[in-house]
Image: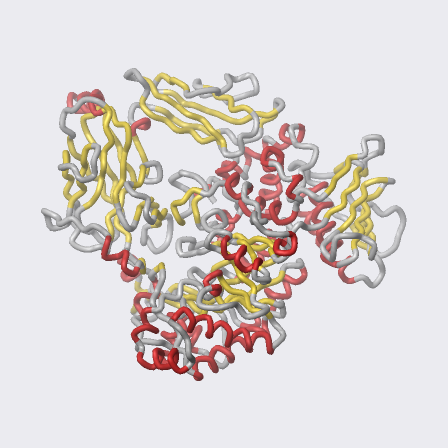
Amino acid sequence: MAELRTALVLGASILALSASAASAAPASSLVPLPASQEIIDQASPVAIAEGARIETPAGDADARAAADYLRDLTERTRGLGLRVASAGASPAVVFRRDPTVAGGPEAYDLRVEKGRVTISAAGGAGLFYGAVTTWQLMTPDAAKGPVSIPAQRIHDAPRFSWRGLMIDSARHYQSPAEIEHMIDWMALHKLNVLHWHLTDDQGWRLEIKKYPRLTEVGGWRVPAGAAAQADIDPATGKPRLYGGIYTQDQVRRIVAYAAARHVMIVPEIEMPGHALSAILAYPQLGSDGPAPAAIQSDAGVFPYLYNVDDKTFGFLGDVLTEVMDLFPGPFIHVGGDEAVKDQWKANPAIQARIKALGLKDEDALQSWFTHRMDDFIVAHGRRLIGWDEILEGGPLPASATVMSWHGVDGAVTAAKAGHDAVVSPAPVLYFDNTQARRPDEPPGRGYLVTLKDVYGFDPAPAGLSDDQRAHILGLQANLWTEHIRTDDRLTAMAFPRAAAVAEAGWSPQGRRDWLGFAARMPVQFERYHALGLPADPAALEVAVDQSPGDAVGQASVRLSTQLGLGQIRYTTDGSAPSPSSPAYASPLTVVLPSTLKAAAFADGAQVSPTAESKLDALSVLRRTSQQLQSCSGKLVLNLEDDGPPRGPRARFMVDVINPCWIYPEVDLGAISKLTVSVGQVPFNFQLGADRAKIPLHAPATANGELEVRLDRCDAPPIAVLPLPPARPGVELSTLSADLPKLSGRHALCLSFTAKSLDPMSVIDWVQLVPAASASAKAGS
């Protein structure tokens, strides 16, 4: 997908690197790194060729499934056709049951010696993970055909039992095929828990047969913005609906698909908050009368909570009964987060219920609510799990598990009280945060969470005793999808960062090392490409940041990579970089115009794709909204335009609580003009009291203006650019203005005037025009 630069990183260019990258690969290319791996230098490697046989014990269904999985992966990546049989001569790979393999049901031993690969495990999951490791040993590069595996011994078992990803299907629907794809990608990283977020304010995706209106109403909505309102469905004559649901038959197939890959699915049914979609379907469930359907396309925290009468609990019990019939795993997630209590406070009947129950306040009522649902769940042989807000208002139910997203404090509190916990802290494990400051990064939250940031997170909180630490089940990364509307973007936001989650959850802490992990990433990306996994390539790429040089006609260029792998080498004459090209050590001074190409090299091999940037007098002065600074950084989002309904859309980095941008360090003595591309996005954010704090500056003209200020955002404007009237079908407008003659380096502060918040004007890019260019254009 071009928008994610996949063609660059995961296409022909990375395949061209395969042979050289293999020679630079680390001693182990396994992800996650196994608990122990011993290379046997004196023993002969094991060759795997076309037609090689995989042997499984007769009648062992788990072993047969693992062998079939290995065969399929090998054919898809190396193009080798292997045979699976229970008996025969000279097997190349042997699966065997061994109850003595230590480490639990996911552990395995792997021996590459005596002419074969032997995978031993006590449990089916161990056999499966041994197959995954064997496949990785067979794919140390992107080559096709026979492969030789060095002789070695591996013993492997996970550090934590919960190694998860959460997929939010409520905000944006993913196809069943995409859910299965994500399960496949998880299994290949030894991730074993899919937390499936199925209900929220914006959608109810799960078919509940007793309450069909949940999906009839909650499964579909009109997206926010004028473009969606104008996108008329000819079949209905109304704005086209967006959404989707999962039937119970589809869910059963997905659950079985996951189980075959040793992935447990944990369903989440939100309560008592995030309940708008259910209340829209059945208004009697709510605490404060009818809710407006139009706000279902908003993001943020809604005030709509379930009622606390017996009929509501009857409804929730009916729903969970059907949920538990679909999902056989031990955990049922009830949410519990962000339950704003305003409606409970204002409802006389609920206040009377609080008094009758002898509760202190609304937080205590939520605790009582959680206990009541826990009683129901436990009576059905399951365990309740909820976000860390379930700790508030009173002690937890005895068997309840906490998922800690406000840092790790909730997990620490739970573990000290004897409760199990999963660490899932924002922002580092919130994968809706951006991975790089690139204009073509997928939309999401504007906080930067790189692959290295994720790898640096340790799931074991400090300050716990050994007994308390045993309550930390593991970790989980979350894919919230308020701004992730396509399947490919979901995968790109997850990977490669989920590989870092996998290593944190599986590998012993003492074996984890960022540089070693980074060295294994180029090979891992080759595997991604071979399987069609559209991972975000930002971690591999060389980032090129350009700015004006000290003299006219020059640019200052900074080069960097997230991995920090090898040495960056570059050219400025248009030729491809090589191991003998100049090495980058400090910011470059480049004569304009030039074409700069750069790539990273390690041990003489290229370990990144080649980055190419054309540098000229205008490019060094152009900044996208992703490259500008936020004035206050309160709630920065990388938003997508609401139109066109189909096809590519512009993306804008904006602080929705303070929409204001800063272009720093501008040499105004060399600048004569400012050109800005602007757009509009719907203001569909539930911000509660924060909405009233958003500054609105009165416009002087009918459509408002873009105001440019010097150094301070409260200074008088030095330029005012009137906005044009809104034009249907036109998403972006270009504004230009001359700047006053000033000297010195200054920051430019840019903000809009407006009569209302909706729609919100936003900056796409800013182009400063040097005085020489403006004069030359005027003369022509």
Here the colouring is secondary structure
Q: How many marks?
A: 0
Is residue 396 depicted above or below 121 in this figure? below
Residue 184 visible in the snapshot: no
Could you tell me residue 264's position as x and y percent?
A: 62, 62
Residue 317 visible in the snapshot: yes
Could you tell me residue 350's position as x and y percent?
A: 36, 79
Residue nearest the viewer, comparing 674 with 50 = 674
Could you tell me residue 208's position as x and y percent?
A: 50, 76
Say left or right for 443 vs 460: left
Residue most toward the right?
Answer: 89
Picture quadrant of residue 512: top right
Could you tell me residue 564's position as x and y percent?
A: 53, 30
Picture quadrant of residue 381: bottom right
Say left or right for 87 vs 286: right
Say left or right for 586 vs 129: left
Residue nearest the viewer, comparing 131 with 587 = 587
Q: Quadrant of the C terminus?
A: top left
Residue most toward the left?
Answer: 700
Residue drawn at x 39%, y 49% is 445
Is residue 530 depicted above or below 587 in this figure? below
Residue drawn at x 38%, y 80% is 355
Residue drawn at x 35%, y 50% is 640
